[in-house]
Amino acid sequence: MINYDHPELKEATRLVAFDVCPGDPFHATCTPIYQTATFDQESAAGFGRYDYTRSGNPTRDVLERQMAYLEGVSLSGRSFAFASGLAAITAVMNLLSPGDEVLACDDLYGGTYRLLSQILVRRGVKVRYADLTDISTATKAFSADTRLVFLESVSNPLMRVCDIEAIARLAHERNALLCVDNTFLSPLLMKPLGLDADFVVHSATKYLCGHSDVMAGIVSVKDASLARDLYLIQNGEGAGLAPHDCYLLLRGLKTLDLRLERQQRSANIITMHLWGKKGVARVLFPGLPGQPNSEVHARQASGTGAVVCFETGDAQLSQRIVENLTLFGIRVSFGSVGSSASLPCNMSHASIPAAVREARHFPADIVRLSIGIEDVRDLTADLDRAFVRAGVEPAAQSPGGSPDVGVKASAAWQFNQGHRASPAFVV
């Protein structure tokens, strides 16, 4: 019989070795889908463990327990599964009251900006934005009404990094809480709750699921009181994840370690491939030499993730490159097994007004690549072809030819040996 409570299990093992159906007398290998809205009760005088799926469901409970384990809060806190990443963020925001203020990092996913600036403010909650990557600026940004700080572990899409422990300390000294969106990295590469954040949220649609077939969100907390408040919101507002989606997300989680290892290694190779490439003005990737706060990222994360962004200096050129890719699908999302490309200004961040993007120096030419599990040689070749078709003449090769992708893969493998050790970039 498998000992699921073995204290020394590594995360890669725990992703597949867990109690998939607690109390099930038939010992199913996979978590059963309890596709039911209601549960019959043994007595009309009280409820059993489950009564209505909005309030609780066995399939969702297994998923939430697994996520709590991955976030390192299985003993003290709790995780909650919601119908989308934005539903998860909304649940956290619903803990605020009129007059409270959210202090948010000024580089955020466009959907989060829309939630904060167009919806939350209607409830009387104030929202302000600041560059939280700079501690001096962050310190001055707090007001007497600040009750929640919101940032992303790696910002989308400018790949900026905040010092989470330092921001958490500033927030707690001022009676505020910290929420970190860790979608870009997943719990395998960063655990914000271990860095003193109060909430960590994920769009589980991305890496946690990994197959673009589930829309889901996760909120995890380590404080029992906050967990009770979040359960009240999950149950009271009815945005909990449906049983079948919970099953699909559980299935996707089992391969998270394998997928992320491959994706991250390939992302490192592609970053090196773009570095210095003709037509590329700047590459954005966590841990890249010269990238602001790269040492902070090295301290608080154990890997880089698998999203690579670059600028060309010409928005039209960027569009031509993206539209000439044949293996990278043009999609707004990221984190799936299939690689994708997007122009954030026109797609995922289009809800941010142009004037705001301009004020925040959001480049119109930025291209975001989500690296999948394909053979990286095919991906680099596809990028090369797209650049040529977009009108970028290939650089002249030295007599020895261009560096072999296999050599780059070897260097990247040394970097990622694994992605738990050191995120220092290799060139």
Image (spheres, helix red, strand yellow):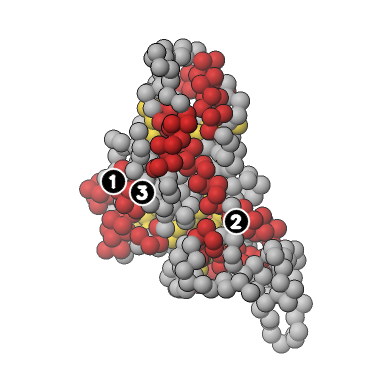
- Which residue in the protein does label 2 denote? 254
Determine the secondary structure under disc 3.
Answer: loop
Displayed quadrant of residue 415: top left
Label of residue 258 in the image:
none
Furthest-front residue in view? 400
- Which residue in the protein does label 1 denote? 295
Q: Identify whether 134 is placed above or below 378.
A: below
Image location of residue 98, percent across then percent down: 43, 59
Q: Mark 1 packing: few (<14 Cα in 10 Å), some, or many (20+)?
A: some
Quarter of the figure that contains the N terminus: bottom right
| Amino acid type, label 1 | Glu
| Amino acid type, label 2 | Lys
Q: Nearer the viewer, residue 136 or 162?
A: 162
- Which residue in the protein does label 3 denote? 422
Residue 181 visible to the viewer: no
Image location of residue 30, percent across then percent down: 69, 63
The structure residue drawn at horizontal position 41% and vertical position 52%, both measured from the top left corner, is 420
